[in-house]
Each structure stands twice: as C-alpha cells, then as structure tokens.
Image: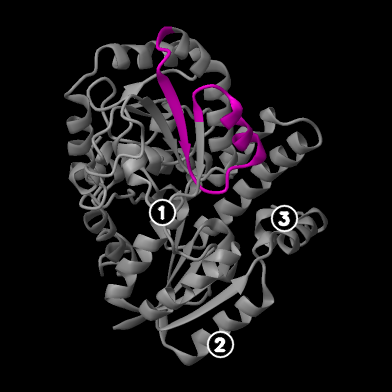
Amino acid sequence: MDDLLYLVHRIPWPPNKGDKIRSHHMLRYLAQHYRVHLGTFIDDPDDAAWLPYVESICSSVCARPLPRRRAQLRALTGFLTGEALTVPWYRDRELARWVRATLTRHPVARAVAFSSAMAQYLPEGRGRTRVIDFVDVDSDKWTQYAPTRRWPMSAIYRREGRRLLAYERQVAQTSDAALFVSPAEADSFRARAPEVAGRVHALNNGVDGAFFAPDAVAASNPYPATARTIVFSGAMDYWPNVDAVVWFAERILPRLRARHPDVAFCIVGSRPTPEVQALAERPGVTVTGFVEDVRPWIAHADVAVAPLRIARGVQNKVLEAMALARPVVASPQALEGLTALPGREVICAEAEPEAFVRALSGLLATPDPALGPAARARVLADYDWSRNLAQLDEFLRPPPGGAFANVAAPEAAHGR
C-alpha cells in the first residue's frame, strides 16, 4: 500500500455529529487502500478515550489537544494578521512539526485535508496529489450568521465570511481537487470562485443502510405507548440546531398542540446548551441529552423534523431519519443538496410557523404510509457510503490523460 497523509480538524471518532460521520467513513475507506498517517485535534476531552481505535487503523497518528480557550486566544491573532479567525484557531506548531517529520520518514505522494482550516498543513511540492474536502462552503455559513447577531458579533461574522472565502479560494487554487458534500454545495462554491470551477467536485455523503434500518431497532421503543412524538436529532451545542429547536418549541409546538394536545416534541442530542435545556420546562417538550443509540428515538417517533433556518451542505439528521423510514418534515434549507423528492419522499415546509403546523397537522391527522418506505428507498439508492467514497480514488489517482479527466461531472455522478 502507498502512504497517505490525512489531516482532520476533529478526531474522526465517534461519529456523533455531521462532520465526524463523514470524516470517519472517509478514514475507514482510506485505511483499506493506503497506509494512513493521521493528523488531527481533540477538542472534546471525552474523545481521547477513542484514540486507541483510531490508532488501530492508521499507520501513525498525531492527535493534538485543542482546548477551546486556547483556540479562542490563537484565533484573535487573525485580527493582527488579516486572516480568517478559523485558520489560527487550528494552528499548532507540534502538528506542523509532525507533518514535516512524517513527510521525511515516509514516501507520502497523496494528502487529504478535511475542512479548509487543515489545508494550512498540506504539503506543497511537485509530484504530490493534494485533495481538500471542504464539505460545506463554511464562509457562507458565517455570512448567514451575521444578520442573526448584534454588533459587534455581527461585524465579526461578516468579516469571517469575507476572509474565509478568500482563504477557501486560495486553498482550492493550490489543490488538485476541491470536494463538497453535494452537487448543490459544489455549485455554490463555483459561483463564488469561478476561477477554480474545474477543480471543484461533489462527493455525496452516505448512510449505513444496514445500521439505520427499521428492523434493527423495532423492539426498543423509548416513548410512552400513548405518545405521538415529533423528534429532532443532532448535536445540541451547534448553533443552527439550537436556533431550530428553540424556534420550533416556541413558535410551532404551541400551535400544533392546540390542534393535537397529545403531541410531544423530543430533542435528542448531546451537549444541549442552557437555552435548549430550558425548553424541557415547556409543556410537551423532552430534552434527552446524550443517548447511547439515537436510532430508537428516531425510528419510533411519528415524525422527524428539521426546521433549520440556517444550514449548509447535507443534513445527516434528515438522511438518517429517511433511512429509518420516518416521515420527515423539513425546511428548504435543510433539504438543500438532497436528491429526495418533496411530497413523495419528504415533506418540505417553509421556515415559518404556519407552514410547519399545516404540514405536521396533515401527517398526524392522516399519516401517509408510503412516505417512510419511499424515503428509505431514496437513501439506499443515492447515499451508499462505499459507492460514493469509491470516487475518492479517482481524485487521489488522476488518470494519465489529465487530472480527473475521467471523473464525471457532479450532475452525472449524482443524478439530479
């Protein structure tokens, strides 16, 4: 096997949030085909317990601690250097030293950076293939945050959106391939960086269809027998998720319970913020915090919701609920980039209260037995990890006729 350098901004295990699901599956795939040298950070002390697992599938690992306070202080240097604050947040001398030593000791001809911030460690030089998996257009996410915050944070977020986009364009320019989580996300970046359009490609996410299968959790219902439950799942310290559940609990659930008094809203996800925890005091709301297995909470709910008002990329919470054959009601933002057909495989409701109340009331009053199976069929058809990740080989081993000459355009590779 050849040697490969894989740089990830957060240790790719356990796969308990969107970016770690993708980085973990990518690591497992790469480890089957290369001797992987992994450089990463541990930003949650609990994740250090999983380091032996990661070491067991890699040839070498450098996992640096990333305490939040230290990262914040480093990020502030970006105001002095003119950089996007994201870049110094992840700057670490020891990791840079390890990368240089790894390149000296091993014949590394290929390198993959997961997230734009890790591109600062990507080695340059002729004869070495450099692939950056941006996943999402993070710069646009900061731009979306800005109007939701008061000054001075609104100004800081706008600045971050501008500076990070400039950095993303620079990184894409110096990479052999720039990957995004969906054709829609790839198109979004091409529009912002037309000079690198030919280097930009989509690499769809996936779902483990055997793991996220209704039959696998049929006997473990966590809800009371009389409950009609609406579920939201996700990392509950992630601000777009926090915004979504607070908005739903405050603006949608009371109207829905006025029509359907037995309806409950269950928020399932680790590290709920104080704002999320406070929602548990509202009638009909449950906040679980960390759960060992999220599948029963989704599979036994009557409906899964994704009322995101700010979103980028592909929402794994939506794909997992679809794989578990649950009816999903989601905002257009949460469905962006998915191939699911609104009305047949998911229900799309505009991010305003009455639209969500109408959609949910309709499903609760007259359940659609075809919706869940159709959703699962779509996931199995379009979101298979092994099939989607197989495209990675084409980016890491460009054909003789020119870099990525045989790689299908995003539209051809991913259908719609």
Judging depth in this view, the residue of 269 and 156 nearest the camera is 269
Q: From the image, tell me which residue sits under label 3.
A: 83
Judging depth in this view, the residue of 157 and 364 nearest the camera is 364
Cα distance between the residues tagged 2 and 3: 26 Å
Cα distance between the residues tagged 2 and 1: 38 Å
Q: Is residue 270 magenta?
A: yes
**Which image quarter is the N terminus in?**
bottom left
Judging depth in this view, the residue of 249 and 19 nearest the camera is 249
Q: Start and end of the magenta stretch?
A: 259-285
Residue depicted at 58% across the width and 24% down the height: 282
Q: Amino acid at mark 3?
A: Glu
Residue depicted at 42% across the width and 82% down the height: 108
The crowd level at tag 3 (other Cα within 10 Å; few <14, some 14-19, many 20+) is some
Q: Secondary structure at mark 1?
A: loop
The crowd level at tag 1 (other Cα within 10 Å; few <14, some 14-19, many 20+) is few
The mark tally for this picture is 3
- Labels 3 and 1: the sequence-earlier one: 3
Residue 101's disc number: 2
Q: Is residue 238 found left or right of 384 in the rendered image? A: right
Circles 2 and 1, Cβ within 8 Å, touching? The answer is: no
Q: From the image, tell me which residue sits under label 1.
A: 292
Q: Is residue 62 magenta?
A: no
Q: Secondary structure at mark 3?
A: loop
User: In front of the other: label 2 or label 1?
Assistant: 1
Counting from the top left corner in percent of width and height, residue 363 is at 30, 16
Q: Is residue 392 found left or right of 283 in the rendered image? A: left
